Image: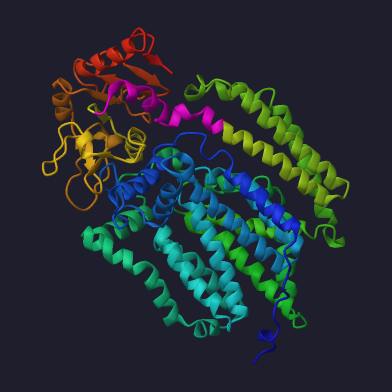
Amino acid sequence: MSERWKTAPVRLGVGWADIAVLVLGLLVLTCGLGGYGFYEPHEGHFAGVAREMLLRNDWVTPTLNGAPYLNKPPLLYWLIATSTKLFGFNEFAARLPVALAGWLGAVVAWKWARELWNPTAGRMAAAMLCMAAGWFLFTHQILIDVLLASLLLASYYCLWRFLWEPRRWRYCLALYGLLGLCILTKGPVGLFFPVLSWVGLALNRRSFASFQKARLVLGAGVILAVILPWVVAVERANPGFLKYFLLNENLSRIADVRWPPDYAVSKVSALGYLAVAGIWGIPWTLLLPQALSSAWQDWQQGRSPEATWSQRRRSEGMLLLTIAAAAPLLLFLPMSSRLVYYSLPALPPVILLCAGWWSRCREPGQRQGQRSLGWVFALLGLVVGTGAFWLPRLVVNLPELANIAGLHFTAAFLLLALGASWLVAGVLLLARWPYRALVGLCLGLSLVWATVANGFATTEAVRSSRQLIAAADPRLGLETLWVFEGSRELGAAGAMSYYLDRRGGHPLAEVPGATRTAPLPPGWARGRAETAYRTVMVLTDGGVNRLPPVFPGPAPAYATNRRQLQEFWDSTRPVVFVTDFLRQPNDPQDPLDLNLPISAKEPLQVVGPRQLYGNAAAQEHWEQSCASRGQATAECSGRI
């Protein structure tokens, strides 16, 4: 047996400092999760599907707004549904799994960094990842990418441990189990990055013997055991799912011909993609030159014939982290379908490299880098701090933000706090107190992110339907039919359905006109055990920007058209119509009244960019509700 396999890593104890850092990271990542409505369409999509899994007691077929929604694997849906089962139908429960996934990613970073360098590096890695701009922002939004990034980081760690300790079966089984979970999170792309990293390590060793020792048959069995039960079940329940998912959601997305296309606001140019990747790592991307230089030295040191076992092990860790950081950037860079958050899996490996340098920056060979970083932080702190006196005025003049109260003060406070923390960190680095600089920087960033979480609530009316439905639904009642003008993604309608029925469904006896055997009236879907829940009708011919997705199977019950909308509008049933909040305000081909029913009058309610119109029956309900509260109709209508 080679000498390489004979030495075991030293066991490292866990101290109070480690626990304090991890607890602080958890507090930061969960701060304010339930304080603002779902940002639509993306958060409404994930929370809505998870909610309907509970309402229908169907954990196989993802369903949104009462119909199958087959564009994502189920792992995040399952996690949100489990959290909702425990904590109720609310925003905190829906966002908690993503925040916990981000925190577990920080735990993996803590463990890996302390094994690569020292316990101090572990604490720094956990703190730096939790404080990174992208990690904080995307743990406060329901998207897949933080979960995927954490699973990928854990799979890289298990791969590294398995290659250096091949007799430890737990790392082998964990690696393959994590790969299966990556597939259940994002699809086949979840397998690509770890395999690419493994190949890179084999090329570095100039030997593919690691694949021969990798128990690939066992690994394939573990991966299939993780993914196959759901894949078989969902294909049986929804024939054509696999073809649709592999072609439309994977190959067509790569070629940028996926339907419906992604919003232009989420797409970026190649240079913009690299810039956004740097923004997600702020402020730690500022020390990327020092981190890469340090990683290069570690890698070179491990390739020396005189290198110790520990140095060789660290060297391969540096290579693995570098590949893991570069792969998401290089893979999506040439694709026109790249979205702003596709680079997020590169962030944890980058943070690990940065933590490795910072934990050793007091060593003689790193002092010049420490001094340079001190000047960068100090100068940028001055620039950002002075920006508090002029930048907020530009922000509040943006049309979509002009009516948000308190935004000017929030923006100014953020810039002052961020600038001050950077300036103090720069001064401490120049004084050769790097550990104190990092502590001060993390405490300052904690204050900044707490303010940002509060700012999400400030801008809620722009991207969430929560305020609109909270104001309007009590005045309209269960018999009211809600119709949405539509948008390119169904998540906005899913969020409206969520807010119309937060109690978890209704007995059939409460549904106007419902029986056990007859089809439910429009605007309702059947749940479990003789229950039903409210849905939102969605226009399918509302314009080229609002054509809904087309999944395998029959047409969804929520689909309607302008002719049917007019029939609803002219009926005696109360009907309300909500305009698309994502329309371009100055587009002459898409005026605000493009899809309004004939005889629609002034809106009953206006919240941000959404306008709510009612037919004659809905207006009567509205007026009666206002009168019962002692309010004139004009007082309880209008803009919020």
Q: Does residue 497 appear in the picture of this structure?
A: yes
Residue 67 locus on image (x, y percent): 24, 46
Q: Where does the image place residue 476, in percent across and percent down from the top left?
A: 28, 22
Q: Which residues are magenta?
A: 455-478
Among all residues in the image, which is located at the extreme left?
Answer: 518
Q: Quadrant of the C terminus?
A: top left
Residue 257 in picture, x, y percent from top left: 32, 50
Q: Is residue 284 above or below residue 34?
A: below
The structure residue drawn at horizontal position 41% and vertical position 30%, both measured from the top left corner, is 466
Left or right for 96, reference 112: left
* Residue at image location 32% in from the left, 10% down from the top: 627
- Is 532 one of the magenta-colored residues? no
Residue 385: x percent and y percent?
A: 73, 30
Specify how the rendered protein is coloured: rainbow
**Helix, strand or loop: magenta stretch:** helix
| Quarter of the N terminus within the rendering | bottom right
